[in-house]
Amino acid sequence: MSDLRSFARETERSIDQPPFEVMIATQRRARRRRAAVAVAAAVAAVLALTLAVAGLNQLRRPQIPSVPAPRPTLDLRVPNWTADQIVGFPAASIVKQFQARTDSRTMLTVWKRCPTPTHDNDCLGREAIAVMDGSGHRLVTLGAVTDAPAQPSGAGDGLLREVGNGLWYWAHENPGPYLLSATMSRPVLLTVVNGPATPNYGVSSIECADQVSLCSLNVAAGTLQRLAVPNVPDTRWATPTAQGCGLWGLAGVGTRPRLVIQQRDASFAVTDLPGDPNSTTMAEGGPNCEVAFYQSVTEHSDQLVVTLDQGRTWQIRQSPLPQVAGYYEHQPRDRFLIPPDWSKLPPMTHPLTPPGPLKPL
Protein backbone atom coordinates (compact mmCIF):
# COMPACT_ATOMS: atom_id res chain seq x y z
CA MET A 1 0.00 0.00 0.00
CA SER A 2 2.89 2.44 0.77
CA ASP A 3 4.31 1.78 -2.67
CA LEU A 4 0.93 2.58 -4.31
CA ARG A 5 0.59 5.92 -2.44
CA SER A 6 4.09 6.99 -3.44
CA PHE A 7 3.29 5.97 -7.03
CA ALA A 8 0.11 8.17 -7.05
CA ARG A 9 2.00 11.21 -5.68
CA GLU A 10 4.69 10.86 -8.28
CA THR A 11 2.10 10.45 -11.06
CA GLU A 12 0.15 13.58 -9.94
CA ARG A 13 3.34 15.66 -10.01
CA SER A 14 4.10 14.41 -13.50
CA ILE A 15 0.65 15.54 -14.97
CA ASP A 16 0.33 19.18 -16.13
CA GLN A 17 -2.21 21.25 -14.13
CA PRO A 18 -4.91 23.20 -16.09
CA PRO A 19 -4.36 26.95 -16.59
CA PHE A 20 -5.45 29.31 -13.81
CA GLU A 21 -8.27 30.93 -15.92
CA VAL A 22 -9.82 27.52 -16.57
CA MET A 23 -9.75 26.62 -12.92
CA ILE A 24 -11.42 29.96 -11.96
CA ALA A 25 -14.15 29.49 -14.61
CA THR A 26 -14.83 25.96 -13.42
CA GLN A 27 -15.20 27.11 -9.84
CA ARG A 28 -17.57 29.94 -10.86
CA ARG A 29 -19.79 27.53 -12.81
CA ALA A 30 -19.97 25.28 -9.80
CA ARG A 31 -20.98 28.20 -7.55
CA ARG A 32 -23.72 29.28 -10.04
CA ARG A 33 -25.12 25.75 -10.15
CA ARG A 34 -25.28 25.61 -6.37
CA ALA A 35 -27.00 29.05 -6.24
CA ALA A 36 -29.57 28.05 -8.89
CA VAL A 37 -30.41 24.90 -6.98
CA ALA A 38 -30.89 26.92 -3.80
CA VAL A 39 -33.18 29.49 -5.53
CA ALA A 40 -35.30 26.76 -7.12
CA ALA A 41 -35.74 25.11 -3.77
CA ALA A 42 -36.81 28.42 -2.21
CA VAL A 43 -39.36 29.12 -5.01
CA ALA A 44 -40.79 25.63 -4.67
CA ALA A 45 -41.20 26.13 -0.96
CA VAL A 46 -43.00 29.49 -1.43
CA LEU A 47 -45.28 28.03 -4.11
CA ALA A 48 -46.18 25.09 -1.92
CA LEU A 49 -47.02 27.44 0.93
CA THR A 50 -49.21 29.61 -1.38
CA LEU A 51 -51.15 26.63 -2.69
CA ALA A 52 -51.69 25.35 0.82
CA VAL A 53 -53.10 28.72 1.94
CA ALA A 54 -55.31 28.96 -1.18
CA GLY A 55 -56.64 25.48 -0.56
CA LEU A 56 -57.44 26.34 3.03
CA ASN A 57 -59.31 29.50 1.94
CA GLN A 58 -61.21 27.52 -0.69
CA LEU A 59 -62.41 25.11 1.98
CA ARG A 60 -63.75 28.01 4.03
CA ARG A 61 -65.58 29.61 1.01
CA PRO A 62 -68.94 28.36 -0.40
CA GLN A 63 -68.58 26.53 -3.67
CA ILE A 64 -69.63 28.48 -6.82
CA PRO A 65 -71.46 26.25 -9.28
CA SER A 66 -69.65 25.88 -12.56
CA VAL A 67 -71.32 27.30 -15.64
CA PRO A 68 -70.89 25.23 -18.81
CA ALA A 69 -69.23 27.04 -21.67
CA PRO A 70 -71.72 28.21 -24.28
CA ARG A 71 -72.00 25.87 -27.19
CA PRO A 72 -71.04 27.40 -30.51
CA THR A 73 -74.10 28.10 -32.60
CA LEU A 74 -74.40 26.69 -36.08
CA ASP A 75 -72.43 28.88 -38.43
CA LEU A 76 -74.86 29.89 -41.17
CA ARG A 77 -72.57 32.37 -42.82
CA VAL A 78 -71.63 32.03 -46.45
CA PRO A 79 -68.65 33.65 -48.15
CA ASN A 80 -68.83 37.43 -48.17
CA TRP A 81 -69.68 37.79 -51.84
CA THR A 82 -70.97 40.96 -53.39
CA ALA A 83 -74.13 40.85 -55.49
CA ASP A 84 -72.09 41.20 -58.69
CA GLN A 85 -69.90 38.27 -57.65
CA ILE A 86 -73.02 36.13 -57.37
CA VAL A 87 -74.68 37.26 -60.60
CA GLY A 88 -71.42 37.12 -62.58
CA PHE A 89 -70.32 33.73 -61.27
CA PRO A 90 -70.53 31.11 -64.07
CA ALA A 91 -71.79 28.37 -61.72
CA ALA A 92 -74.53 30.56 -60.18
CA SER A 93 -78.05 29.36 -60.93
CA ILE A 94 -81.28 31.20 -61.71
CA VAL A 95 -83.93 30.31 -59.14
CA LYS A 96 -86.67 32.83 -60.07
CA GLN A 97 -87.39 35.09 -63.00
CA PHE A 98 -90.23 37.56 -63.55
CA GLN A 99 -91.13 39.64 -66.58
CA ALA A 100 -92.80 43.02 -66.14
CA ARG A 101 -96.42 43.05 -67.23
CA THR A 102 -96.12 46.25 -69.23
CA ASP A 103 -92.67 45.82 -70.81
CA SER A 104 -91.25 42.43 -71.72
CA ARG A 105 -87.73 43.90 -71.76
CA THR A 106 -87.87 44.60 -68.04
CA MET A 107 -86.86 41.50 -66.11
CA LEU A 108 -86.23 40.61 -62.49
CA THR A 109 -83.95 37.61 -61.92
CA VAL A 110 -82.95 35.96 -58.66
CA TRP A 111 -79.55 34.28 -58.77
CA LYS A 112 -78.06 31.89 -56.25
CA ARG A 113 -74.45 30.95 -55.63
CA CYS A 114 -73.28 28.06 -53.46
CA PRO A 115 -69.85 27.64 -51.81
CA THR A 116 -69.85 24.02 -53.03
CA PRO A 117 -72.05 23.76 -56.13
CA THR A 118 -74.08 20.62 -56.69
CA HIS A 119 -76.14 19.51 -59.65
CA ASP A 120 -79.34 20.83 -58.01
CA ASN A 121 -77.73 23.70 -56.01
CA ASP A 122 -79.23 22.28 -52.82
CA CYS A 123 -76.84 23.96 -50.43
CA LEU A 124 -76.39 26.82 -48.01
CA GLY A 125 -75.99 29.70 -50.46
CA ARG A 126 -76.60 33.39 -50.99
CA GLU A 127 -78.98 35.01 -53.43
CA ALA A 128 -78.69 38.18 -55.44
CA ILE A 129 -81.54 40.05 -57.17
CA ALA A 130 -80.94 41.71 -60.54
CA VAL A 131 -83.46 44.04 -62.22
CA MET A 132 -82.74 45.20 -65.79
CA ASP A 133 -84.76 47.05 -68.41
CA GLY A 134 -84.36 47.73 -72.10
CA SER A 135 -82.92 51.20 -71.56
CA GLY A 136 -79.67 50.12 -69.92
CA HIS A 137 -80.76 50.58 -66.32
CA ARG A 138 -79.66 47.90 -63.88
CA LEU A 139 -80.00 47.27 -60.16
CA VAL A 140 -78.15 44.40 -58.50
CA THR A 141 -78.55 43.81 -54.76
CA LEU A 142 -77.93 41.03 -52.26
CA GLY A 143 -80.83 38.73 -51.45
CA ALA A 144 -81.29 36.23 -48.63
CA VAL A 145 -79.31 33.28 -47.30
CA THR A 146 -81.24 30.20 -48.41
CA ASP A 147 -81.45 26.45 -47.83
CA ALA A 148 -80.16 26.81 -44.29
CA PRO A 149 -81.38 24.87 -41.22
CA ALA A 150 -82.33 28.22 -39.68
CA GLN A 151 -83.17 31.00 -42.10
CA PRO A 152 -82.49 34.67 -41.36
CA SER A 153 -86.23 34.93 -40.87
CA GLY A 154 -89.20 32.62 -40.84
CA ALA A 155 -90.04 33.86 -44.30
CA GLY A 156 -87.14 32.06 -45.92
CA ASP A 157 -85.99 33.65 -49.15
CA GLY A 158 -89.01 35.95 -49.39
CA LEU A 159 -91.60 36.57 -52.07
CA LEU A 160 -91.53 39.04 -54.98
CA ARG A 161 -94.57 40.72 -56.55
CA GLU A 162 -94.80 43.39 -59.22
CA VAL A 163 -96.69 46.34 -57.73
CA GLY A 164 -96.09 48.88 -60.51
CA ASN A 165 -94.64 49.17 -64.00
CA GLY A 166 -91.30 47.46 -63.48
CA LEU A 167 -91.55 48.00 -59.72
CA TRP A 168 -91.35 44.95 -57.46
CA TYR A 169 -92.14 44.48 -53.80
CA TRP A 170 -89.90 42.06 -51.89
CA ALA A 171 -91.81 40.55 -48.97
CA HIS A 172 -88.93 39.64 -46.69
CA GLU A 173 -87.70 40.43 -43.20
CA ASN A 174 -84.04 41.13 -42.49
CA PRO A 175 -83.20 42.19 -45.16
CA GLY A 176 -86.27 44.08 -46.24
CA PRO A 177 -89.03 44.68 -46.94
CA TYR A 178 -87.95 46.54 -50.07
CA LEU A 179 -89.15 48.08 -53.32
CA LEU A 180 -86.97 47.25 -56.33
CA SER A 181 -86.71 48.63 -59.86
CA ALA A 182 -84.06 48.86 -62.55
CA THR A 183 -83.82 52.66 -62.29
CA MET A 184 -83.00 52.64 -58.55
CA SER A 185 -79.42 52.96 -57.35
CA ARG A 186 -80.30 50.86 -54.30
CA PRO A 187 -83.46 49.17 -52.95
CA VAL A 188 -85.95 51.40 -51.14
CA LEU A 189 -86.53 50.16 -47.60
CA LEU A 190 -90.21 50.23 -46.69
CA THR A 191 -91.32 51.65 -43.36
CA VAL A 192 -93.44 49.14 -41.44
CA VAL A 193 -96.23 51.05 -39.65
CA ASN A 194 -96.96 49.82 -36.15
CA GLY A 195 -100.51 48.82 -35.28
CA PRO A 196 -103.00 47.02 -37.50
CA ALA A 197 -105.36 49.07 -39.66
CA THR A 198 -109.06 48.27 -39.99
CA PRO A 199 -109.54 47.21 -43.62
CA ASN A 200 -112.28 49.02 -45.47
CA TYR A 201 -114.08 47.10 -48.18
CA GLY A 202 -112.08 47.45 -51.37
CA VAL A 203 -108.68 48.08 -49.81
CA SER A 204 -105.87 46.54 -51.84
CA SER A 205 -103.93 43.86 -49.98
CA ILE A 206 -100.56 42.21 -50.29
CA GLU A 207 -98.49 39.80 -48.24
CA CYS A 208 -96.74 41.28 -45.23
CA ALA A 209 -93.01 40.75 -44.91
CA ASP A 210 -93.67 37.65 -42.78
CA GLN A 211 -95.72 36.23 -45.71
CA VAL A 212 -98.46 35.22 -43.25
CA SER A 213 -100.44 38.36 -42.47
CA LEU A 214 -102.09 40.72 -44.95
CA CYS A 215 -100.78 44.26 -45.37
CA SER A 216 -101.65 47.42 -47.22
CA LEU A 217 -98.80 48.80 -49.34
CA ASN A 218 -98.51 52.54 -50.00
CA VAL A 219 -95.93 52.81 -52.77
CA ALA A 220 -95.92 56.62 -52.84
CA ALA A 221 -95.32 56.91 -49.08
CA GLY A 222 -93.08 53.84 -48.91
CA THR A 223 -95.06 52.30 -46.04
CA LEU A 224 -96.38 48.84 -45.24
CA GLN A 225 -99.15 48.41 -42.66
CA ARG A 226 -100.74 45.24 -41.38
CA LEU A 227 -104.49 44.83 -41.83
CA ALA A 228 -106.66 43.76 -38.89
CA VAL A 229 -108.19 40.60 -40.39
CA PRO A 230 -110.20 38.16 -38.24
CA ASN A 231 -108.20 35.72 -36.18
CA VAL A 232 -109.57 32.50 -37.68
CA PRO A 233 -107.08 29.63 -37.21
CA ASP A 234 -105.43 28.08 -40.27
CA THR A 235 -106.69 30.69 -42.73
CA ARG A 236 -105.02 31.07 -46.11
CA TRP A 237 -105.98 34.51 -47.39
CA ALA A 238 -106.42 35.19 -51.08
CA THR A 239 -103.41 37.26 -52.10
CA PRO A 240 -103.39 39.77 -53.45
CA THR A 241 -106.91 41.05 -53.88
CA ALA A 242 -107.46 43.80 -56.40
CA GLN A 243 -108.53 47.34 -55.58
CA GLY A 244 -112.30 47.41 -55.15
CA CYS A 245 -112.62 43.80 -53.92
CA GLY A 246 -113.12 42.59 -50.39
CA LEU A 247 -110.79 40.28 -48.48
CA TRP A 248 -111.49 36.57 -48.23
CA GLY A 249 -109.74 33.39 -47.24
CA LEU A 250 -110.09 29.62 -46.89
CA ALA A 251 -109.80 28.23 -43.36
CA GLY A 252 -109.41 24.74 -41.91
CA VAL A 253 -108.44 22.85 -45.06
CA GLY A 254 -108.49 19.10 -44.36
CA THR A 255 -110.57 19.38 -41.20
CA ARG A 256 -113.61 21.64 -41.34
CA PRO A 257 -113.22 23.93 -44.34
CA ARG A 258 -114.80 27.37 -44.12
CA LEU A 259 -114.73 30.56 -46.13
CA VAL A 260 -114.10 33.89 -44.40
CA ILE A 261 -115.55 36.66 -46.58
CA GLN A 262 -115.52 40.41 -46.05
CA GLN A 263 -118.90 42.05 -46.59
CA ARG A 264 -119.52 45.42 -48.22
CA ASP A 265 -119.98 47.09 -44.83
CA ALA A 266 -116.38 46.00 -44.04
CA SER A 267 -117.52 43.32 -41.56
CA PHE A 268 -116.56 39.66 -41.94
CA ALA A 269 -118.75 36.56 -42.18
CA VAL A 270 -118.00 32.86 -42.35
CA THR A 271 -119.70 30.03 -44.25
CA ASP A 272 -119.17 26.29 -43.83
CA LEU A 273 -118.12 24.11 -46.78
CA PRO A 274 -118.76 20.40 -47.32
CA GLY A 275 -115.86 18.57 -45.70
CA ASP A 276 -114.21 15.24 -46.32
CA PRO A 277 -113.94 13.14 -48.38
CA ASN A 278 -113.80 15.96 -50.96
CA SER A 279 -110.68 18.10 -51.25
CA THR A 280 -111.06 21.88 -51.42
CA THR A 281 -108.66 24.35 -53.03
CA MET A 282 -108.83 28.13 -53.36
CA ALA A 283 -109.42 29.59 -56.82
CA GLU A 284 -107.85 33.04 -56.88
CA GLY A 285 -107.29 35.86 -59.31
CA GLY A 286 -110.84 36.49 -60.46
CA PRO A 287 -111.18 39.67 -62.57
CA ASN A 288 -114.57 40.59 -61.09
CA CYS A 289 -113.96 40.17 -57.35
CA GLU A 290 -115.05 36.52 -57.41
CA VAL A 291 -114.82 34.42 -54.27
CA ALA A 292 -114.28 30.90 -55.57
CA PHE A 293 -112.90 27.46 -54.81
CA TYR A 294 -112.35 24.15 -56.56
CA GLN A 295 -113.79 20.98 -55.06
CA SER A 296 -113.18 17.43 -56.21
CA VAL A 297 -116.36 15.53 -57.09
CA THR A 298 -114.75 12.29 -58.27
CA GLU A 299 -111.22 11.21 -58.94
CA HIS A 300 -111.33 12.75 -62.40
CA SER A 301 -113.72 15.70 -62.09
CA ASP A 302 -113.80 18.96 -60.17
CA GLN A 303 -116.43 21.59 -59.67
CA LEU A 304 -115.83 25.33 -59.54
CA VAL A 305 -117.97 27.13 -56.93
CA VAL A 306 -118.24 30.90 -57.35
CA THR A 307 -120.02 33.78 -55.61
CA LEU A 308 -120.26 37.37 -56.84
CA ASP A 309 -122.26 38.73 -53.90
CA GLN A 310 -119.96 37.93 -50.96
CA GLY A 311 -121.41 34.46 -50.25
CA ARG A 312 -125.15 35.05 -50.48
CA THR A 313 -125.66 33.05 -53.68
CA TRP A 314 -123.43 30.51 -55.44
CA GLN A 315 -122.90 29.22 -58.98
CA ILE A 316 -121.42 25.78 -59.64
CA ARG A 317 -119.67 24.91 -62.90
CA GLN A 318 -117.90 21.92 -64.35
CA SER A 319 -114.19 22.51 -64.35
CA PRO A 320 -111.07 20.82 -65.64
CA LEU A 321 -108.66 19.83 -62.92
CA PRO A 322 -106.93 22.91 -61.57
CA GLN A 323 -103.56 21.33 -62.34
CA VAL A 324 -104.23 21.92 -66.05
CA ALA A 325 -101.92 24.51 -67.60
CA GLY A 326 -103.37 27.98 -67.30
CA TYR A 327 -105.16 27.22 -64.04
CA TYR A 328 -102.03 27.06 -61.94
CA GLU A 329 -99.48 29.73 -61.04
CA HIS A 330 -96.12 28.66 -59.64
CA GLN A 331 -94.52 32.07 -59.08
CA PRO A 332 -94.43 34.18 -57.06
CA ARG A 333 -96.47 31.72 -54.97
CA ASP A 334 -98.26 28.47 -55.76
CA ARG A 335 -101.87 29.40 -56.56
CA PHE A 336 -104.78 27.80 -58.39
CA LEU A 337 -106.45 30.40 -60.62
CA ILE A 338 -110.05 30.92 -61.62
CA PRO A 339 -110.55 30.94 -65.43
CA PRO A 340 -111.38 34.43 -66.73
CA ASP A 341 -114.27 32.92 -68.75
CA TRP A 342 -115.54 30.70 -65.94
CA SER A 343 -119.18 31.78 -66.56
CA LYS A 344 -119.05 29.99 -69.95
CA LEU A 345 -118.27 26.64 -68.33
CA PRO A 346 -121.22 24.19 -68.35
CA PRO A 347 -123.23 23.74 -65.14
CA MET A 348 -122.37 20.76 -62.96
CA THR A 349 -124.92 17.96 -63.53
CA HIS A 350 -124.67 16.50 -60.02
CA PRO A 351 -123.01 19.18 -57.92
CA LEU A 352 -121.97 18.72 -54.34
CA THR A 353 -123.75 20.62 -51.60
CA PRO A 354 -123.12 24.38 -51.90
CA PRO A 355 -121.71 26.39 -48.97
CA GLY A 356 -123.95 26.99 -46.00
CA PRO A 357 -125.49 30.31 -44.88
CA LEU A 358 -123.32 33.22 -43.83
CA LYS A 359 -122.64 33.70 -40.12
CA PRO A 360 -121.23 36.99 -38.85
CA LEU A 361 -117.90 36.92 -37.08
Image (spheres, grey):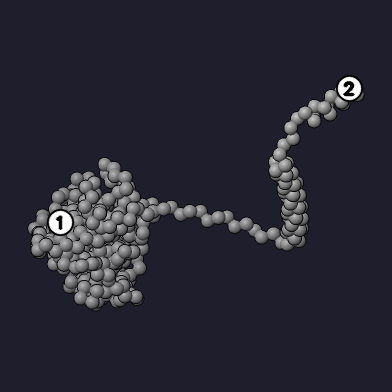
Disc 2 marks which residue?
3
Q: With 8 as the anchor, is 242 left or right in this view? A: left
**Picture layout, residue 180 above or below residue 47:** below
Position of residue 28 in the picture relative to residue 99 (left or right): right
**Rounded to the nearest whole Å, what is the CA distance between mark 2 and mark 1?**
140 Å
Query: How many circles with numbers are drawn on the protein?
Result: 2
Name the residue at 36% across, 56% down. 151
Instruction: Using a 10 Å C-alpha cutoff, classify the residue at mark 1 as few (fewer than 14 neighbours), some (14 to 19) or many (20 or more).
Output: many
Name the residue carrying label 1.
317
Q: Quadrant of the C terminus?
A: bottom left
Occupied quadrant, residue 200? bottom left
The quadrant in which residue 345 appears is bottom left
Q: Earlier in the sequence, mark 2 or mark 1?
A: 2
Q: Which of pointers 2 and 1 indicates the residue nearer the eye?
A: 2
Q: Residue at x 26, y 74 (%)?
A: 223
- Position of residue 208 measured from the top left corner of the image (x, y, whole percent): 29, 67
Residue at x-position 15% and y-position 60%: 132
Tell me residue 123's x, y (percent). Answer: 32, 47
**Amino acid type at image mark 1:** Arg
Name the residue nearer the viewer: 140 or 14: 14
